[in-house]
Amino acid sequence: MRRGILYLVATPIGNPKDITIRACEILATADLVLCEDTRITGQLLSYHGIKGNLQSYHEHNMESRHPQILERLTSGESIALVSDAGTPLISDPGCRLVKLTLESGAKISVIPGASAALAGLSASGLDTTRFAFEGFLPAKGKERRERIAELVNEKRTIILYEAPHRLKRTLADLNGEECLRKRRLSIGRELTKEYEEYLYLTLQESLDYYEETVPRGEFVLILEGKSEFDDRSPQEVFTKSEQASLDELIAERLVQGMRLRQIAKEIAELTGLPANDIYERTLQLKGIKTGPPRLGGDDNAN
């Protein structure tokens, strides 16, 4: 008997034209198309002139659907699984179905295509060689707090999804971890759609931005990992406003004739910034090129 096939078909994440020819062929010829929302998938198929046999498959009914789906697969039928947008199983239901399909002896075939995670990552300007996909953070409670705490030491670039009504809360919760506040953050909004937008801020700046701006659309957040953050120089880590304030504090003390070591110590106590970073910036403002600062030794630069 011919083995059935479960096709995992990627669909557009916004622009309906972002679908492959092969995906259209599979959706047109499959015996059954499983989708989260038949209205959304129906609109996509209609746009491309496809008449598919649609059946809903989502987190609230998937367990009850499995016996019938497996029966059809073992009888040799072809079934396509799609999500509302993007690649199936990525922050969407379907993992259990794939496992059951493999156990039944039916085949799995992937029809690749759009992915919001990879689209956002590629436009982020952050390290793309190693990354961790987190999807949506847990909604609340201990699990959410623990997941966010884990991100502090995540060395790889971090990919998150968020909905508009939860964005400000997520940014606030991430800012609750002080070590994350100066991390660079790329925010992709409404990817591939008419109002597509990318913002490049620090995590701290993003919270300020959305205090003045109403979040609209679906968001992909790309957060700088610990390794890339640690490799940046102290001056790169300062925000523009912080840098200007620091320079002003240093300049005031230079005019007073204070020694560099004393300036670094005093401003560190005042701001909480590392004394070595302040010392290094003071040398730069004086136009002095030197090796690593030695705050415990003689101050010969003044």
Image (spheres, grey):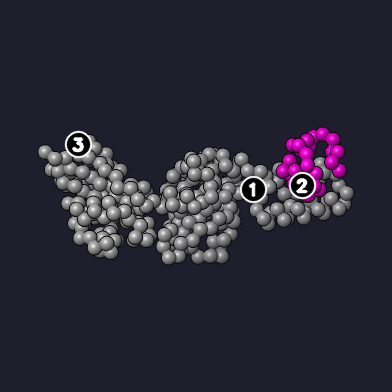
- Disc number for residue 105: 3
- Residue placed most toward the observer, 13 or 175: 13
- Disc number for residue 284: 2
| Disc 2 packing (10 Å; few <14; some 14–19; many ≥20) | few
Q: Disc 1 residue type?
A: Val
Residue 98 in the image: x percent, y percent? Answer: 27, 42
Instruction: Kindly check if marks 1 and 3 are in contact, taking CB atoms under 8 A apart as contact.
Output: no
Is residue 277 part of the magenta span, yes or no? Answer: yes
Q: Which residue is rendered at x = 48% and y = 56% of the image?
A: 188
Kindly identify which residue carries mark 1.
Answer: 237
Question: Outermost residue, right direction?
Answer: 257
**Which of the two labelled residues, at mark 1 and mark 3, occupies the earlier sequence position?**
3
Separation of residues labelled 2 and 3 (CA atoms)? 67 Å
| Disc 1 packing (10 Å; few <14; some 14–19; many ≥20) | some
Quarter of the image for the N terminus: give it.
top left
Separation of residues labelled 1 and 3 (CA atoms)? 53 Å
Separation of residues labelled 1 and 2 (CA atoms)? 16 Å
* Circle 1 SS class: helix
Magenta residues span: 275-302
Question: Outermost residue, top direction?
Answer: 297
